[in-house]
Amino acid sequence: MPTTRAERRSSLSEVLGRNWIGIFILILIVLFSALSRAFLSIDTAQLIFFNGTEVFLLAIAELFVIITGGIDLSVGFVMGFSTVVSSKLIVAFAAMGMSPLASILAGSATMILIGLLPGLVNGWLVAYLRVPSFIATFSMLGVTHGISELMTQGIPTKNLPALAGNIGNGSFLYIPPSGVLSFFSRPQVARGQIVVAILPDMVVFAFIFILIFAFVLGKMKFGRHLYAIGGNIDAAIRSGINVKRDLIKAYVLSSMFASLAGISYVMKYITGKPDAGANMLLEAIAAVVIGGASMAGGSGTVGRTILGALVIAILETGLRILGMQTFMTYILVGAILILAVIIDQVFPNRNQ
């Protein structure tokens, strides 16, 4: 039986609702390319991912908690806390006589371990004391911010090894005029010769972790448990899932990814600041919601969250190239967030 015009319209609207993020990204690329010839280039594409590294990591941090039906308001200041602690650890290890590379690795590894603590406390408060996630994580926001400010006394951390900046602003692959590939180290060339840099180090660093935990969330039992908890916590308990343990794990992972975002910031900007991630909370939550996750829990994927974060990164980079002020990004992100919520209401099953 042939389909009617109404059925075809309904089918088309469903396709558009399911794939609106990809369509929106294409529209942004076409728009910014029309407004600036400099936008459509390999360099700009890499700049988008480079500028968005911390948002990608914070969005994944937020995703783990939102899937369970909670929210983590502390990720921005846990990131700031991470920038302060990791930078001070790196400086301290270097002062003890460790090589620049060893001090960076030791400081970063130690920070990842320390960075699990805010999530452990958040998870324990939510899982065992049944404190609403909004209150628990908002309290942790204040704690981590206060500790960071006490440690810096208003002065950003300085004197990190130059190697930190070289790593943070370097690339995985370099192609010199000779065509001989160089990995991680920019080759020396004659003045005026161009070296093509491919894949910023911090983007590679971020996506190694993102891909690992995309597999965990999508393919492992723990990931299925998180979706079950967010879908119906009572049913999850009755099915034998250790809800308290898995909730703690979700908040610990959120804190870990926020700490990784802080380490990325330190490598890129060679400093530690308590408020480094203060303005990124809205962007992290927006990326998850734009990516199709429900704030009620039970849905959301790493892939679509990255697309949501990519929308924000393209906006920020495009507006910067056009010379527009930063606050325009917040206005547009807020407007897109409203659009995402409306689409979610109109097409509630668009991610199924």
Image: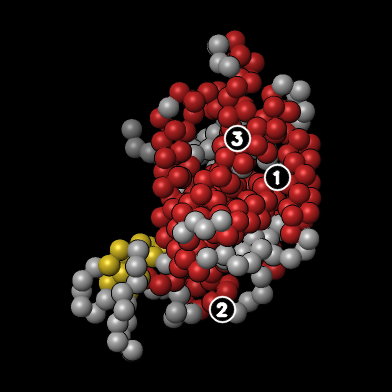
Residue 224: image location, x then y, percent: 49, 25
Q: In this view, does 199 lie to the left or right of 89?
A: left
SS for tag 1? Answer: loop
Which residue occupies 34% across, 67% down? 185
Give me the C-alpha separation between circle 3 and circle 2.
Answer: 39 Å
SS for tag 3? Answer: helix
Mark earlier in primary sequence (1, 3):
1
Q: In this view, does 177 lie to the left or right of 109?
A: left
Which residue occupies 20% across, 74% down? 179
Residue 143 seen in the figure: yes
Labelled disc at residue 252: 3
User: In the image, which is nearer the foreground, mark 3 or mark 2?
Assistant: 3
The residue pinned by badge 2 equals 322
Callout 1 amino acid:
Ser
- Vertical placement of 185 versus 234: above or below? below
Q: How is the image coloured?
A: secondary structure
Please report contact status of discs 3 and 2: CB closer than 8 Å, yes or no: no
Residue 270: image location, x then y, percent: 57, 66
Which of 167/198 is in front? 167
The residue pinned by badge 1 equals 74
User: In the image, which is nearer the foreground, mark 1 or mark 2?
Assistant: 1
Q: Quadrant of the N terminus?
A: top left
Residue 63: image location, x then y, percent: 57, 40
Which residue occupies 69% across, 24% down? 127
Give me the C-alpha separation between circle 1 and circle 2.
Answer: 32 Å
- Vertical placement of 43 versus 260: above or below? below
Q: In which quarter of the image is residue 173?
A: bottom left
